[in-house]
Image (spheres, rainbow, N blue to C red):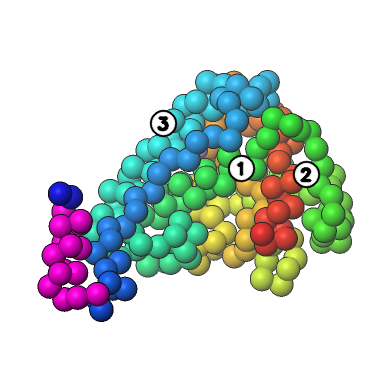
Amino acid sequence: MQKRTFLKTTLTAALGAAILPHLDLLAQPVEFTLPALPYGFAALEPHIDAQTMEIHHGKHHKAYVDKLNDALKGKPEANLSLEALQKVMDKQPAAVRNNGGGHYNHNLFWTLLTPNGPGKPSGALAAAIDKDLGGLDALKAAFEKEAKGVFGSGWAWLCKGADGQLFITSTPNQDNPLMPLKGIRQGTPILALDVWEHAYYLKYQNKRADYISAFWNVVNWAECERRFAGK
Ligand code: MN3
């Protein structure tokens, strides 16, 4: 008999059915897991190569998940959702911030890429891009400038602020705009680009700008629109 089943059976027998609603107290936190990619490793070729995708997902992202689970072992934060965890990062040690950010950022990043590009934004998101950023070409120019300007490792972001306005920003390392940290402009991520060297070096080497240009061919604008609508 499994330990939990034994406890549940014993407790139920001893205390009666009245305790049943409280038995979830015995539940162990569910560990974070590496999500499957929503497309094949080679699906984003030639813009992002298969070997990069395989290593990025299977080694880098997996390491963030494993180290996050280790760092949260026995802590109440292990019960939080991945998004809720980002919002308490001001109170976490470096191992949780780095690996929790790494897991959230990559989870998000895979969904923001698609083999069905290049597309473009439509609907309410397209209207907001026109109103807040001066159109798609201006968005791309500002986003590319931000992505190229990250010194060392980090991420570029298109976000929706609390006021509903779009803005472009960047974060160092595995930080993200959900984290209530000094120096980070807070917002809901709509689009994200990983500019760590591990995201592009095999194909693009030192040419980060070429990787950033190629990125527009695989952006999943439908997912950006869904996020912008708050769904
Ligand atoms: Mn990465």
Residue 206: mark in rendering: none
Crowdedness near tag 3: few (<14), some (14–19) or many (≥20) residues, C-alpha within 10 Å: few
Q: Amino acid at mark 1?
A: Thr
Image coordinates of residue 21 in percent, x first then y, are 31, 73
Q: Main secondary structure of the magenta part?
A: helix
Marks 1 and 2 close (CB-CB < 8 Å): no
Image coordinates of residue 76 in percent, x first then y, are 30, 65
Choose mark 3 or mark 1, whichever is in front: 1
On screen, residue 74 above or below 23: above
Residue 105 shows in the view: yes
Q: Earlier in the sequence, mark 3 or mark 1?
A: 3
Q: Residue at x 68, y 20 (%)?
A: 46
Q: Residue furthest bottom?
A: 18
Classify residue 6 by image quadrant: bottom left
Span shown in magenta:
3-17
Marks 3 and 1 close (CB-CB < 8 Å): no
Q: Earlier in the sequence, mark 2 or mark 3?
A: 3
Residue 95 shows in the view: no
User: Which SS class for mark 3?
Assistant: helix
Q: Amino acid at mark 2?
A: Lys
Image coordinates of residue 120 in percent, x first then y, are 82, 42
Residue 59: mark in rendering: 3
Q: Residue at x 68, y 66 (%)?
A: 161
Q: Amino acid at mark 3?
A: Lys
Relative horizontal placement of residue 61, taking residue 18 as reference (left or right): right
Q: Which residue is mark 1?
A: 111
